[in-house]
Image (cartoon, rainbow, N blue to C red):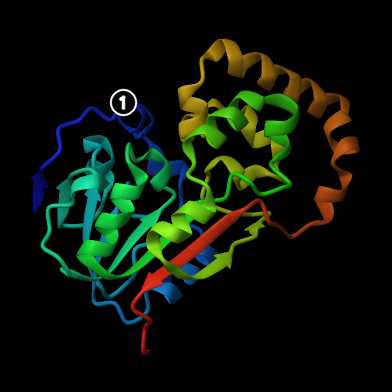
Amino acid sequence: MEETTDSRPQATYDRIGVGYRAIRRPDPRLHALIGSALQGARSVVNVGAGAGSYEPEGADVIAVDPSQVMLDQHPGRRKVKAGAEQLPFPDGSFDAAMAVLTVHHWPDPERGLAELRRVARRQVVFTWDPAHRPQLWLLEEYLPEIRELEESRFTPLAQVVDALDAHTVLPFPVPHDFTDGYQIAYWRRPEFYLDPVVRRASSTFAQLPAAVVQPAIDRLRADLESGAWHRRHAELLDQERMDYGYRLLIAGEVSSE
């Protein structure tokens, strides 16, 4: 079943969404963390669902996304094309609402978060704290334009916590072999950023012009070939996980299971 309630153009994900599932493969460790937060929820709405990553097994899930390209890749039966700010469901329709790395794409995050609280008794949101340090070396050394873009569109963590009235904030240090190919995934595998297919699966890369991205990638390639990158970041090669500010927020009803 697929319904449409929002016809707004979603240029970014309509453009990068093709082939998204091949690069953005759910990581089992993040899946376990989100699954634990959703434990006991029998009905779940996944807002900004994309291709359906991190949805809980055994629950009745409705996927909501404003991008038709993304919904077409979602494997579920129940899909609704809509924005987070106007969810087409009655109050308290779900045991839980989930939103994974999507709040920064919403035109009105506070309204969208209020909608999560309206339609579900529990809210589980995975997001990034733009004030966290350290940041990924890619932003510091090669593409400060990405840092400017990220800091302009990500709602400060404290505001998201307040809007949700979240009672739990869990850090998620990113494993060095993280399988979900969003921007932070390759902090210890810099050669992956050279691959245009990998870059196309990231909304930040997709929103920057080639005239900005390509010279930075050329400099990274040169630094990898000369060994300069490895000399600067030798300490990273011994790290299993790095905390770059990714957080799981839990609000509303506490699971009794």
How many numbered discs? 1
Percent across and percent down for residue 251 are: 40, 70
The single residue placed furthest to the bottom in the displayed view is 257
Q: Is residue 182 left or right of residue 220?
A: left
Percent across and percent down for residue 196 are: 54, 26
Q: What amino acid is at disc 1?
A: Ala
Name the residue nearer the viewer: 63 or 237: 63
Name the residue nearer the viewer: 116 or 40: 116
The single residue placed furthest to the right in the displayed view is 231
Q: Is residue 247 left or right of residue 72?
A: right
In the picture of the structure, the residue carrying the numbered disc 1 is 11
Q: Could you say whether the residue bearing mark 1 is in a helix, strand or loop? A: helix
Determine whether 149 is above or below 37 in the image: above
Percent across and percent down for residue 198 are: 53, 34
Q: Taking the image as drawn, is residue 61 in sight?
A: no
Q: Is residue 200 left or right of residue 110?
A: right
User: Within 10 Å of the Cα at label 1, are there few (<14), some (14-19), or many (20+) other Cα atoms?
Assistant: few
Determine whether 102 is above or below 255 in the image: above
At 10% from the left and 49% from the top, the residue drawn is 2
At 45% from the left and 33% from the top, the residue drawn is 203
At 75% from the left and 19% from the top, the residue drawn is 219
Q: Is residue 190 left or right of residue 145?
A: right
Q: Taking the image as drawn, is residue 174 in sight?
A: yes
Determine whether 138 is above or below 250 in the image: above
Percent across and percent down for residue 242 are: 71, 55
Name the residue nearer the viewer: 127 or 190: 127
Which quadrant is the C terminus positioned in?
A: bottom left
Residue 233 figure quarter: top right
